[in-house]
Amino acid sequence: MTHPTRRRGPRRRVLTTTVGLAALLVAAGCSTEQEGSSSSSGSSAAEDCINADEAQAEYTASWTSVKEAFGLTDFEPVDETVCQVDGEQWKAEPKQGDSYRIAFAAQGPTNSWGVLSDEALKYHAKELGVDVLYAAANGDATTQVDNIQQLTSQDPDAMVVVPMGDGISGQVKAAVDQDIPVVLCSGLLPDSSGAVSTVTRQYDLLGSAYAEWIAEKLGGKGKVAILSGLAGVPTAEYQKAAAEKTFAKYPDIKIVTTQYTQWSPTVAKTVAQNLIASYPDLDAIWSDSGYGALGVVQAYQEAGKAVPPITGDSINEFIQATEGTDVQYALSTFPPEMSSTCLDTALDLLKGEPVLDKVYVDSPSFTDADGAQYARDDCDGGLLVPSSAPEDLLVDLKMCKAS
Amino acid sequence: MTTATTGSASVLTRLSTVLAPLAGLVLVLVLAAVTTPQMYTPDVVRIVLFQVGIIGIAALGQTLVLLTGGIDLSISGAMAMTSVVLAVTTGGSDGRLVAGVLLSLAAGLAVGLLNGGLVVLRGVPPFVATFASLVLVQGVVIAWTGGAPSGRIPAGLSWLGQGRVLGQVPVPVVVFALLALAALVVLERTTAGRRVYATGFNPDAARLSGVRPGLVVVGCYVASSLLGVVAGMVNASYIGYVDAALVRSLNLDSIAAAVIGGVALTGGRGRVGNTLLGTVMLAVLLTWLIQLGAGAGARLVVSGAVIVLAVFMQGRPVRIPRITAREKDTT
Amino acid sequence: MPETALGARGVTKSFPGVRALDDVTLACAPGRVHALLGENGAGKSTLVRILTGDESPDAGTVVVADRETRLGAPREALGLGIVPVYQELTVLPEMSVLDNVLLGQERSRRGLLDRGAQRELARAALARVSLEDLPLGTRTGELSLANQQLVEIARAIARRSSVLILDEPSAVLSGDKLQALHDVVRAIAAEGTAVVYITHLLEEVPALADDLTVLRDGKVVSSGPATDYTTDRIVREMVGRQVDQVFPDPAPPAGEVVLRVSDLVPVGSSAPPAHLEVRAGEIVGLAGLVGAGRSRFLRTLAGARGRSQGGVDVGGRRVRGSLTGAIAAGVALVPEERKRDGLVLDLTAAQNITLTDLRQVSSAGLVRTARENAAFDEERERLGIKASGPGQPTRQLSGGNQQKIAIAKWLRVSPRVLLLDEPTRGVDIGAKSEIYRIVRELAASGMAIVIASSELAEVIGLAHRVLVFRDGAVVGEVHRDPDSAERIMHLALGTAS
C-alpha cells in the first residue's frame, strides 16, 4: 500500500512527514471500525446503511483480485463497513452555465505521482466536458487549507480533494456545510470532515497481501527481513503493522530485522549490503516500495547471491531491472490515475446516481510469473505499471514516448 | 612561562582536538566488536569504506566552508542536482557521459558562485544563503523535470560507485583518499590554504594584511559545491538511477563528519585529518547502527547526540591557549 | 550626611606592563559636583571602574559614606546607591521611556508588574531631569541623543542614587543642550547627591564643578576647589613634565616628499579636508583626544576606509583608494586593535609575518617552509622578537612581541610609508622603548612614518612635528619645543587662545 507522497521527487521526505498525519488518522479510524464490526458483526452499522450488501461486495472484490493475482489461498479482507450514499441529496443542476464546475484541491506536481494524479483528473474532465477549478497544495497541508477556502468561495458544483493532512478537515467541513459535495481522493480524513465519499486504495490491503504472499511462498517457515520506508511516518508504519500482524499468524516465520530505506534505492542498497553480511540465510524480504526492492536486488546481484523473494510497488524500473532474472516478486500499486475515478464519483453525486461512501479502488497486482509483460521500455522508470492512464496523456507528460 | 612548557602545551592542544574523536572511534569499534562481531568481516568493512568515501567527499567540501566560518547546506542539493543532470543530459547512454559530467560541474560552479556571492557581496548569513540555494536547486530541478526526475545514469560511470580497486577496495574511498590528499596539500602547504586559515581565524586582520577574504570565501563555496557534484556522481553511479529521495541525510552527515572530527563551526580551526577521523567514525557508527537493526529514529538520535557531544568537547581545546596567553601577559 | 559620599584611599591598580593607578586618594562630598580631569590613559576610566565595583584595587580601599568598603561587583555598588552613567548610552532604543527608566528595578505586586507604581516612579525621576512632559510610552529610540542621555540619568535617579558618576556626558551634547544638562546636574547635586563628572571639555569646569581632581599617569597631580584653578593650570597639570630627555632629538629629515595627502575627507566625516606631506625619514605624530579622528585618518590613508574626496600620492603617483591599492603603492598600516585587526592570533609567528606577502616565501603556490623560517629569523633579528620559534602560536606571545610581529609583517613588503596607530598600547615599558628605537631606525632608513598615539609624551618624543586633531579636523601643527605638550593639549581640548 502506498501513499501519494511516497512517490519519488526531491521533496518526498518533507511531503511524507506533513501528510503522514492523515495516515495516522486513517490508522485510528480503521481500528475503531474494526472493533465496532467485530463486536456487533456489522449488523448495527447495516441498519442505517443503504444497499449494504452490494456495497460490501465491491469492497471484498478489491481483496479478492489481489488474492487471485498473488495466488493466495488464505487471504480474507479486514472487516470494513461500506455504505451507499443517498445520491438524491446531492443531485443538482450546474450552478453556472450548462457544464459542471468541479473544484480540484490537488497535491501539485511535486513528484511524478502528483503530476499524474493532477493531469489524469484534468484529462478526464476534458473528456467529459466538465470545467475544473484547480489549486495545487505542493504537498503542504497549510497551503491546501487556503486553497480549499478559495475554491469554496468560487462556489463550485462539487470538490475533489487529495488530502495533504488532517489539518484540512475543518476547511473540508466548511465546504460541505455550504452544500458543496466533497470527494476525498487518494487518502483519508476523519469522519468529522463530513466528506461525502472517499476514493482510495486501501491501506491495509497491500501490507498484508505482500506478507501473505511471502508466508505462502516460504510454506509458513523461514527468516524474513522487513524494509519499511521512514520510521515513524504513519503511511509506512501502518503497512508495516499490517505485515507484522499477518506474519504473526505463522509461528515459524521469524522477522530477523526491521530496517528503513527512506524509499531510496541508494539507502536500500546499503541496507541490503548489510543484510547480506549479517543474515546470509534470509529467506525473503518484505519491502513496501519498488525503489527499496530495486536497491536490494542490486546489492544481491553485486554480491553474486540469489535474490530472496521480495515485494514492493510496481515501478517500471524494478520490472526492467529484474527482467530475464529469476528474481521472485509480488507487486501492486497505489495508482495516481485513480483521480479520474474521484471525478466520476463527484459527478455521479451531482447526477443523483448511487455512490459508495468508501470507494476502494482496485489496481493491478502481479507476481514475477507474469511481471515481464508489464515492463514499459518506452516509459519513464518511475511510472507505476501497468498504468490505466490514457496513453496520449502519458506521452504529453513525457512519461512515455509516442509509439 | 618557559619555552618548553609552551611547546608541550601547544602539542597537547593540537592533540586534544584529535583525542576525543579518536577515543570515540575506538569506543564504537569496541562496542561493535562485542555486539556485532560481523562488523569485522570483509563485506562489512567494505560497506564502511564505501560510506567513508561518499560521506568524506562531501565532508571535505563542508570542511573548507566551515574553515571560513560558514556552513554549506546546499551540498546535498548539488548532489541531487548532479544525478538529475547526468540522467537527463545523457539519457542513460555512455556517448554523452562527458557532456553530462561537464554540465554537472558547470551547474556545481553556478551553485557555489551563488552561495559565495550571497555570503560575500550581500552579507547574507551562510546558513540562510545556502539553505535558500538548496531550495532553489530543488525547485529548478522540479521545474525542469516536471516534478518527475528520473532516468538512468550511464553504465560507463558505474565503476565510480560500484567499482573496486585491487579487487577489494571500493572506488569511492580511493577517490576520497586522493581528494583528501589534495585538500591536505592545499590547506597545509599552499598560499591559498594559508589565506583560508587566516580568513577563517580573523577576516578583519586578513583583509588588512592584503588578503582578499571575499575571494577566499567564494573559492571555498565553489570548491564545496564542486565536491558535492563529485559526491553526487559517486552516489548516482552507485545505484545507477536518479534517486531524488537521498537529499538531506548527506547534508547532515557531511557537517557531522567535520564537526565530530574537531573542525570548529566558528571558522579557522580544523584540519583535513580531523575531517578524515570524523568521517571514519561516522561511517563506522552508521554502519554499526544498521547492523544493530536500529531504526532511522535511533540513527538520527545517535548522530545528533554525537554532534552535540563533539561541539561540547570543542570548548576544551580552545581554552588551553587562552590560559597560557593570560599567564604570559601577567608575568 | 557623610563627609565623603564616595572616595578612594591609596588606591593602586596595575595591568600587565602598566601601572594604571598609583596611590590615588579622592573624596567626593555630597551635594557637590566633582570634576575628574586628565589626559587619555591618565587612569580616569580605571578609577571609575574601581569606584563602581567593576574592578578591585590591588591596594587601597574605596570609601562609601565615610566607611571603607569592599565592592565585589557592580551590583554591590548599585546597592549602595553608586550609579554610573557611561559615555556609551545604554538605553534600549526599542523599549518605551517608562521601561528604560525602570530597567532592572521593575516594581511588581504579586508577581505582576505594578503599572501604577511604575509610572509614578518614572514620572518623578523624569521630572528631575526636566522631562516631565515626555509621554512615558514614547519609543526611546525616537528621542534626540540629548534626551536619551537625560533618560539615562533619570534611570540613575530612579535608583535613588547617593552618588552619580557621569562619564563624559558632554561628548554628545552642545550649546543649550549642554546648558540644560548642567542645570539638571546642579539640581541633582543641590538635593544632596554627590556627582562625579568626567569631561574633556574644560570650559565646562568653572560653570559646573565645585571641586576638581587632575590625574596624570595614574597619579593625582592636585585636587581642590574649582575656583583655585584656571584653564591654563589644569592643562599644565594634565600634561606635566617635559619628556624630551627620554627621546633624543631625531635626525632632521632630509629626503624628498614621499607621502602627499591633499584635500582628504574620509567617508562619513563632515570635517574640513586634511592636508599632509611627509618626507622620507620624517616622523609625523598625530595627537588628539580619543575619537578626534586620528585613527580614521590613518585608516583612510591605508585604504581600509573610503575617501569622500581628496587624494593620496606616494612618490608622486596617485594611490587607489583600496587596501590592495595602498599596499601596492607601499603604504602599510599597523592598526590600533592589534588582536582584532593586526594579527591572526591563531596562526604561528612566522605565518603572521609572511601573510602580507606570501609570494615571497612560496613558489608555484606552495609555501616553502625554509624560506618562511628564514623570513621569521630575519625579522626576529631586526626587531628583537622573543618567541620560542617560528612555529609558536602568536596568541602565546606577550603584547610587546605581538606588536613587533604586527610591525614585522609590514616590513616584509618594504613599505615606503608606515602608518602606526597606537603602537605601544598594552605593551610593557621595556618593549615600548624597543618599539621607539625601531621606529627611529626605520625612519633613519628612509621610511616616511606617521604615528598616532594617545600618549602625548610618545608623539612629542618621537615625531619631528605633530598634527593635532579635534572633532575630525586637523586643528593645528606643533613642532618640537619645550612648550609643545601644553600647546598640543590646548589645541586638542579646544582651549587654545
Image: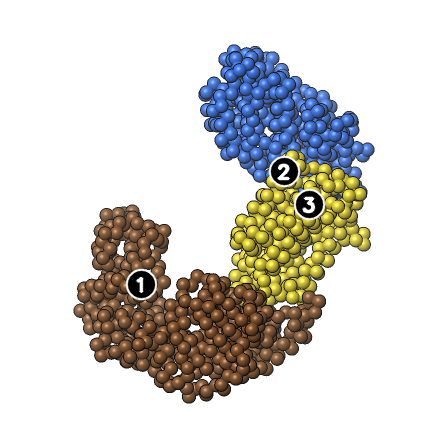
Q: Residues within 10 Å of mark 1 (few under 14, many from 20)?
A: some
Mark 2: which secondary structure?
A: helix
Q: CA distance from mark 2 to mark 1?
A: 60 Å
SS at circle 3: helix
In the picture, one chain is blue; tell me its letter.
A
Q: Answer yes or no: do the residues labelled 2 and 1 have beta carbons within 8 Å? A: no
Residue under circle 2?
B142
Chain C, chosen colour in render: brown
Q: Position of residue A223 (x, y in %)?
A: 71, 37
- Decide which of tag 2 and tag 3 comes sooner along the chain: 3
The chain containing the residue under callout 1 comes to C
Measured from the top left, where is residue A37 in percent x and y? 55, 20
User: Seen in the image, is B141 located left or right of residue A29?
Assistant: right
Q: Quadrant of the N terminus of chain A?
A: top right
- Residue C185 x, y percent position in the rendering: 24, 64
* Label 2 and label 3 in one chain: yes
Residue C173 circle label: 1
Compared with residue B216, is residue C7 higher up or lower down, i.e. above or below?
Answer: below
Residue type at mark 2 is: Ile
Quick one: B54 or C278, which is closer to the camera? C278
Q: Residue at x 75, y 46 (%)?
A: B99
Report the front residue among C433 and B279. Answer: C433
Q: Give the SS element for disc 1.
A: loop
**Which residue position holds label 3?**
B82
Residues at marks 1 and 3 on the same chain = no
Disc 1 residue type (three-letter) = Leu
| Dot 3 amino acid type | Thr
